[in-house]
């Protein structure tokens, strides 16, 4: 069972912007957290990324309200200096992904959910990265 789940920014954006590519699965995963079936985490950097894009499509007021609503059930965890250094020293070329991944590793998450296929392939055994549909099939059904 995955009880500590880290969500990539693309999952938050799929949900908040109701993107066709992933809205329903993102909604199902967030509902899983609301139902208390898992603890779900992001970093302040993901709040920053999501806030930027939600504001582009809506307004700062709507973005703040959406993010505040999510933060009732999704917890923010801190990025440590050590996690940042490990991320930058890693073989992951996407710095944002590396920062999120090594922060999740540091906080001993059970899994990481992302739609980024390259990122899924680069995962370490101690922290698997699942696409949302695979996560749902493996843990929620």
Image (spheres, rainbow, N blue to C red):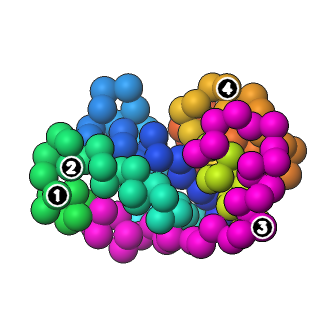
Q: Which residue is mark 4?
A: 118
Residue 94 lies in the magenta-colored region: yes
Task: Please state the horizontal and vertical placement of residue 101, each as a whole percent of the image.
Answer: 68, 51
SS of the residue under disc 1: helix
Camera-side mark, 4 or 1: 1
Q: Secondary structure at mark 4?
A: helix
Decide which of tag 3 and tag 4 comes sooner along the chain.
3
Q: Is residue 15 visible?
A: no
29 falls in the magenta region = no
Going from N to C along the chain, the mark reached first, 1 or 2, is 2
- Measured in 3D between alpha carbons, the distance from the residue under mark 3 to the one under mark 4, in whole angstroms, is 24 Å
Distance (Cα) linking label 4 and label 1: 31 Å
Report the Cα–Cα distance between label 1 and label 2.
Answer: 5 Å
Q: Badge 4 local density, few (<14 within 10 Å), some, or many (20+)?
A: few
Left or right of 137, for residue 58: left
Residue at image point 81% right, 44% down: 90
Question: Dot 1, crowdedness within 10 Å: few (<14), some or many (≥20)?
Answer: some
Q: Mark 2 = which residue?
A: 55
Give the label, 2 or 3, closer to the camera: 3
Q: Position of residue 94 (x, y in %)?
A: 64, 36
**Image quarter hosting the N terminus:** bottom right
Residue 139: percent from the left, percent from the top?
Answer: 64, 48
Instruction: Name the one closer to the observer, 50 or 110.
Output: 50
Residue bearing mark 3: 82
């Amino acid at each position: 069972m995955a009880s500590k789940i880290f969500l990539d920014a693309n999952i938050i954006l799929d949900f908040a912007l109701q993107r066709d590519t992933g809205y329903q699965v993102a909604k199902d995963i967030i509902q899983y957290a609301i139902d208390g079936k898992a603890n779900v985490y992001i970093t302040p950097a993901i709040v920053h990324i999501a806030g930027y894009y939600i504001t582009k499509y809506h307004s700062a007021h709507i973005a703040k309200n959406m993010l505040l609503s999510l933060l009732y059930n999704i917890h923010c965890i801190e990025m440590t200096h050590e996690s940042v250094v490990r991320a930058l020293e890693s073989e992951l070329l996407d710095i944002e992904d590396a920062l999120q991944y090594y922060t999740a590793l540091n906080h001993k998450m059970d899994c990481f959910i992302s739609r980024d296929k390259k990122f899924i392939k680069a995962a370490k055994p101690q922290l698997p990265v699942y696409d949302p549909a695979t996560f749902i099939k493996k843990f929620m059904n």
